[in-house]
Amino acid sequence: MILSIETSKRKFQHDKKVVSVLLSLAIIFSAAGFAVYAEDKNMIFVSPSGNDNSSGTIDAPLATLSAAKEKAKNFDGEVTVYFREGTYTIENTVNFYADDKSDVVYKAYRNEKVMFTSGSPYTGFDECTVNGVRAFKKDIGKGADFNILFNEQTTLSRTRYPESGYFYVNDVSDDDIQPGDDKNDQYHTGFLGMYIDNSNFFDFKNMEDVEIKLLHFWKDETLLIKSYDKESGHIAFNKTSTMRINKNDRFFLQNVFETLNKPGQWYLDKTEGVLYVIPNESDTPENYTVWGSTTETMISVDGVDGISFENILFRANGFFYLPKREFTQAAYDVKYCISYKNEKNFHIKKSQYRDIAACSVFLGSNVRNASVESCLFNNIGAQAVYVHGENIDINDPNVTKNITISNNLISEYGRTYFNAVAILVIHANSVDITHNEIHDGYYTAISVGWVWGYSHNVCYNNRICDNLIYNIGQGWLSDMGGIYMLGNQPNTVISGNVIHNVSADPEEGGYGGWGIYLDEGSSYMLVEKNLVYSCGSDSYHLHYGSYNTLRNNIFALSGESQLRIVTAPTRCTPDDGGQKTVDLYNNIILTDQKTCVLSYMHNTSTMDERNNTYWDLSFGEELYASKETNINRSLSIKTAIRNGFIHSPIIADPMFRDAASFDFELSPDSPAIAAGFEPWDYSNAGTLSETTIGLSAEGGNTAYNANSAHVPMTPAKEQKRFLAEIINAIYFFFKNLFGSIC
């Protein structure tokens, strides 16, 4: 360990004081951690080979989470429940209520690999042939129903028809409109059926088991087939759609027996109760095991404080589609793997959530002083973290508040519900969303607020800072943002984020692929020191609001414009339109043959614009702005200045190191810096570990990469890593020396 420290000192000769401080902190932290661990007498042990009638000691462990929960009631003070390595199957929801023991941490013992799952194993398959390929089948009983199947390595794929691309709605009829709905409502009219091109359909095996995945604007939904008329091509649904269906809307089918033909695919014949799987070449019926999950919520906590989980892998909970017309925007009403409400003073830390069918972590009403930190979320059906309080008085003691969501890696979310948001916050305040890396979702990455317009909003004092967000949308839906906000949110800060490659559905004109999106009524927010680039629509979009400040941001190289600021005479401000919409200064706006500012404002005085740097990589100072929503009706930047639309601009090359290759390091001689722009270290965005940064983007765009050859790791970032290395070394030193105590 001494050698390691000396090596690090030599590495940081330029900053010995920092190294000394870091070392001191590491020793203090490790010593404190050792003291706590050594004094922890309230311990319960659980093992897959244990017995729930045992004492719960390390030599006589319990077998289940439920038994440990009951055993904890025998202790006073804080309790730690240690799980030994192995898999723990949760067949029914484990509920924590007010009469359970508070202040209990449930965690893996000594970093052993511990998995909680709700899956039921299926073995004893028979070999058969399906659609001309080798398959396995098993009779699991009529009435069996689940939507997720997995093996030891991964979640298996449901069949899809067509295997790629989409079908398109052939026509709709007023006769299918839900009685009572307004047929002229573009978005909220419900339909009970639609017409399709009957050449795409045939006599599917068990038509009633086939699922229709319908995509429209900002939502998707799943509908089952109630009936199908071959002659007319009319499909009747089992429930009403949540949005209007239009001609040429996209859809595809799932759970189609006839397309079962590739390894890793599965099909459930619900009518006959038979499960079909296409195995890999090396699989045999004798050695083949898969798990099907029917438990929606593994753990529910309601009314007992301090129930925390650490270093647990949660894998594969089930889900069921709602049998009624549901409100599906942002996957608002899905179920969750682990749920909290009426709970305070707890954490979820260093855990993994993989192959989760719907939402992973739900923090509901009256949740306070909670954190979700240093977790990994991958292949998530809906949200990774969903916070949902109540829109009550901000001084009400039941307000959901003081929540930290930090240092998490979230990838491949929204796999079941495409419109899910990776981190969704509804009706909560004092929420810190910091240092997360979020990528590969079909809709918005971070969304805060659930009030459209200027009505009462319990959201305020929220921080969305230093997150790395990329490859969002991917052309599936529309009207989304890397960061999406709604309503009045005083003292809310959006800062230090890096956002790129947000793209909407191209068949909707690419509408709504925005980097930072302040939607209806978003007000009193500070947006500063964000790097946003290569988005399909605009880097920044404000859809009416008041008293927002945009300063010291880089908005660059997005598809329509870099700034879209929209107001309407009737919705500009809470009163008569006399309030300021946005204060825009000291930003860098870099474009390339695109409009730099796209704004539709009934009164230009509502935008205070000054000291921004504008440049076009292709045309230089031949820039264009617009006061119309139609970007083809553009003004030259000089005309915009004469008309009072743009004030005191700096029209000059900001002198990035290589903006065309998405390297936005500024030269010290930049005219933007001379005009007041303050550079910041954008490599601090993302997780605090070094293992998740630098993934490559798709579509020909180079991803932001803090560790690339042309962007060296910054001293700040390197110091964080150095501290982590020291703490880790000291931890394992004490662990190896005194491990017998635990």
Image (cartoon, grey):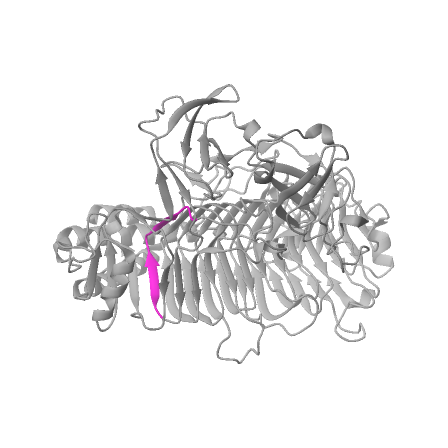
Q: Position of residue 684 (x, y in %)?
A: 48, 52
Q: Position of residue 529 (x, y in %)?
A: 58, 57
Q: Is residue 666 visible to the viewer in this orientation of the structure?
A: no
**Residue at (57%, 48%) from the top-left corner?**
417
**Front-most of 67 and 543?**
67
Give the side of residue 595 with respect to residue 2, left or right. right
Judged from this view, the residue extending furthest toward the top is 132
**Residue at (62%, 42%) from the top-left corner?**
213
Residue 337 in which image quadrant: bottom left
Give the side of residue 692 with respect to residue 483, left or right. left
Please say whether residue 65 is one of the residues in the magenta stretch: no
**Residue at (76%, 32%) from the top-left corner?**
231
- What span is colored magenta in the figure? 305-317
Q: Is residue 329 visible to the viewer in this orientation of the structure?
A: yes
**Front-most of 621 and 592?**
592
Q: Position of residue 166 (x, y in %)?
A: 67, 34
Please identify the quadrant where the C terminus is shown: bottom left
Give the side of residue 180 with respect to residue 120, left or right. right
Q: Position of residue 540 (x, y in %)?
A: 68, 54
**Front-most of 628 and 592?**
628
Residue 367 in which image quadrant: bottom left
Instruction: Count the marks.
Output: 0
